[in-house]
Image (cartoon, rainbow, N blue to C red):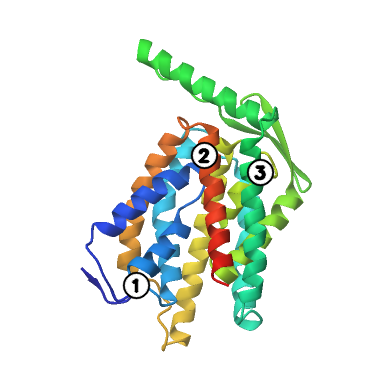
């Protein structure tokens, strides 16, 4: 099948299959998987025009809602945290794109800096996995797994489903966010989360790094939030920023007729269909996966991005 906008020729079943396999795993940690699909499109499909970025963002728009809906149904959505992420990353995306055009026309040196920072985040997350710790994060995750196992046994014996632990917001204002998950309390600085989200948005807008792939590991490694609670807010943040990015690219397209900037809607849609199914499967699967496995997925994801940036120098 030939896609005239991207110039790609590929069997129509390959994009959705690849997207399904990627998103089924990455969505368990709040990552859409777009950061893995981008090199696949560039290296394997030969899609090298600027439109590959907007196509990748369109994939996220189509794929993410199915996973988000499932997480909301299971009660693992923290709306204030989602609001902070969106309010921080959204202006950051536009500011990052502006900086990229005006000041960062030769971003090689800055990419090394970004790569090293991401590498530190990735290794920090991996270090928390290798060191056995007794924290609210670990206790909450372990108790959640115990509840899932117990509910599964009860369902097998009685045929009745029991609800899983849900997230409850206890306090939210301009200074702090407090929520409870499975008997443990977590206190976040609203301003810290906002500023970090803004920085992530700027980096994502300038260099096309998916926000969820950075914010999710930060939540887990630095704020020590349970991995089961970060997936939904980060996916929603990625969805909003991807939507903004696609609109931005579409607006810019008429001003640069010599470049292919607007998304390849058909190719992005095929990736999105596979991603939509994968996101749903990943969201359904998350509660059965050990927290350590999900954290390893996040750690490997962020280290992969970091090495890619450093190696491209």
Question: Image height check: is 260 above or below 27?
Answer: below
User: Which numbered dot is residue 294?
Assistant: 2
Q: Position of residue 221 (x, y in %)?
A: 66, 43
Neighbor class of circle 2 (other Cα within 10 Å; few <14, some 14-19, many 20+) is some
Neighbor class of circle 1 (other Cα within 10 Å; few <14, some 14-19, many 20+) is some
**Mark 1 or 3, nearer chain start:** 1
Q: Position of residue 277 (x, y in %)?
A: 34, 46
What residue appears at the point 32 percent right and 68 percent down from the top-left corner? 45
**Of helix, strand and loop, which one carries label 2?**
helix
Answer yes or no: do the residues labelled 1 and 3 have beta carbons within 8 Å? no
Q: Which residue is denoted by mark 3 in the rendering?
A: 221
Kindly indicate the quadrant of the structure image that contains residue 7: bottom left
Answer yes or no: do the residues labelled 1 and 2 have beta carbons within 8 Å? no
Question: Image height check: is 125 above or below 150?
Answer: below
**Of helix, strand and loop, which one carries label 3?**
helix
Query: Front-most of 141 and 82?
Result: 141
Q: Which residue is denoted by mark 1 in the rendering?
A: 46
What residue appears at the point 49 percent right and 38 percent down from the top-left corner? 72
């Amino acid at each position: 099948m030939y896609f005239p906008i991207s110039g790609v020729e590929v069997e129509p079943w390959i994009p959705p299959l690849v997207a399904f396999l990627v998103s089924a795993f990455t969505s368990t940690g709040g990552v859409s998987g777009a950061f893995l699909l981008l090199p696949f499109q560039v290296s394997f499909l030969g899609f090298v025009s600027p439109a590959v970025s907007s196509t990748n963002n369109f994939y996220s728009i189509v794929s993410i809602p199915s996973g988000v809906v499932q997480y909301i149904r299971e009660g693992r959505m923290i709306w204030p945290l989602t609001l902070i992420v969106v309010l921080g990353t959204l202006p950051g995306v536009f500011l990052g794109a502006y900086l990229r055009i005006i000041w960062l026309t030769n971003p090689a040196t800055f990419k090394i800096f970004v790569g090293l920072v991401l590498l530190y985040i990735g290794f920090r997350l991996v270090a928390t996995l290798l060191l056995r710790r007794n924290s609210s994060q670990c206790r909450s995750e372990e108790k959640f797994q115990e509840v899932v196992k117990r509910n599964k046994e009860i369902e097998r014996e009685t045929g009745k489903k029991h609800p899983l632990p849900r997230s409850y917001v206890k306090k939210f204002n301009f200074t702090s966010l407090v929520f409870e998950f499975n008997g443990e309390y977590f206190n976040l600085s609203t301003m810290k989360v906002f500023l970090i989200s803004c920085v992530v948005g700027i980096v994502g807008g300038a260099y096309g790094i998916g926000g969820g792939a950075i914010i999710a590991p930060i939540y887990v490694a630095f704020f020590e939030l349970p991995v089961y609670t970060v997936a939904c807010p980060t996916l929603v943040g990625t969805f909003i920023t991807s939507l903004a990015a696609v609109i931005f690219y579409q607006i810019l397209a008429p001003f640069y007729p010599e470049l292919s900037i607007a998304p390849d809607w058909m190719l992005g849609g095929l990736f999105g269909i596979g991603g939509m199914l994968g996101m749903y499967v990943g969201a359904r699967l998350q509660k059965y996966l050990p927290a350590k496995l999900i954290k390893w997925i996040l750690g490997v994801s962020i280290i992969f991005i970091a090495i890619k940036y450093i190696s491209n120098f």
